[in-house]
Image (cartoon, helix red, strand yellow):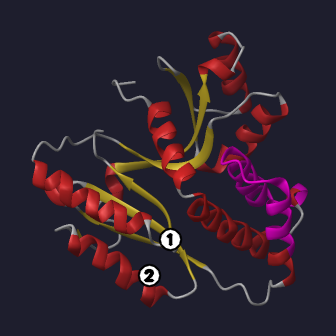
């Protein structure tokens, strides 16, 4: 697909996560709490919670840590006040940036996100200012080395499960779904024992932008590093061609 290796990006993210497991476990812990509050502590009756558990396992979170997180959230349901918020803006060179956060203090989070944009010579904008450049999709990445299925069989399995699109890369397969169908497709593949390197609802750029100016690259990385260090920030999407 246009030369962009999704699995290479996933591996890059995982390497960063492995260097800062506390950060990714904090992110997933908040998602567990929000999912439990939204639909209860039983994964069998809460598809969002099932998806977060799958994400936790993909990031090597121990089962007992997952169970403790769910029990803690269930015991504190009245006290869990996390809200999902999204910010959009531009980084250096016109790079589009979307920031998703889960916070118990929107004023604090907005201030931190705005500061990250400003320090990287970017600008935080209004809702919708860049999101039209992205498509919201369920995305499942499968490592070729981990999957023994014939590519054609895997494609038919994914499409039969409700996927919208299937593509091959040198090191991976990518399955795209409508966001509303993601849970069902992911569960179907999991039930059939298909290993997933990553499975999440994400924002995929319609086109990519290349940065060549060293100052722009350095400033963008500063913004992304500041956002990465913020515990409220759950995910950051850009249209940067890496």
Asked if one can make out residue 182 in the rendered structure from this viewpoint, the answer is yes
Give, as a single range, the part of the protein colored magenta. Answer: 44-71
Q: What element carries label 1?
A: strand
The vertical placement of 114 against 151, above or below, is below
The circle drawn on residue 101 is 1
Q: Are marks 1 and 2 in contact (CB under 8 Å)?
A: yes
**Magenta portion: prevailing SS class:** helix
The one nearer the camera, 53 or 26, is 26
Residue beneath disc 2: 109
Q: What element carries label 2?
A: helix
Q: In which quarter of the image is the C terminus?
A: top left
Residue at the location (67% across, 34% down)? 196
The vertical placement of 182 against 153, above or below, is below
The one nearer the camera, 222 or 137, is 222
User: Could you classify mark 1 by the number of other residues whose Cα lies within 10 Å: few (under 14), some (14-19), or many (20 or more)?
Assistant: many
User: Residue 26: percent from the left, percent from the top?
Assistant: 62, 68
The vertical placement of 2 against 148, above or below, is below
For residue 53, side relative to residue 86 (left or right): right
Q: Residue furthest front?
A: 19
The circle drawn on residue 73 is none
Residue at the location (43% across, 90% down)? 107
Please tell me which of labels 1 and 2 falls first in the chain: 1
């Amino acid at each position: 697909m246009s030369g962009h290796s999704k699995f290479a990006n996933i591996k890059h993210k995982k390497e960063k996560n492995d260097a800062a497991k506390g950060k990714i476990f904090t992110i997933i812990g908040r998602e567990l709490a929000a999912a439990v509050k939204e639909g209860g502590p039983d994964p069998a009756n809460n598809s969002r919670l099932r998806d977060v558990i799958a994400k936790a396992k993909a990031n090597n979170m121990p089962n007992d840590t997952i169970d403790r997180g769910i029990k803690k959230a269930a015991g504190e349901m009245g006290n869990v006040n996390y809200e999902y918020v999204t910010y959009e803006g531009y980084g250096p060179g016109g790079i589009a940036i979307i920031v998703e956060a889960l916070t118990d203090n929107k004023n604090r989070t907005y201030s931190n996100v705005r500061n990250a944009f400003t320090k990287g010579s970017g600008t935080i904008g209004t809702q919708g200012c860049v999101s039209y450049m992205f498509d919201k999709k369920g995305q499942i990445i499968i490592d070729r080395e981990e999957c023994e299925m014939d590519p054609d069989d895997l494609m038919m399995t994914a499409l039969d499960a409700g996927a919208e699109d299937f593509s091959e890369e040198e090191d991976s397969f990518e399955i795209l779904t409508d966001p509303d169908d993601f849970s069902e497709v992911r569960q179907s593949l999991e039930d059939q024992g298909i290993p997933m390197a990553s499975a999440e609802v994400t924002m995929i750029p319609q086109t990519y932008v290349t940065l060549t100016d060293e100052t722009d690259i350095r400033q963008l990385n500063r913004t992304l590093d500041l956002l990465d260090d913020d515990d409220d920030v759950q995910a950051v999407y850009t249209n940067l061609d890496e």
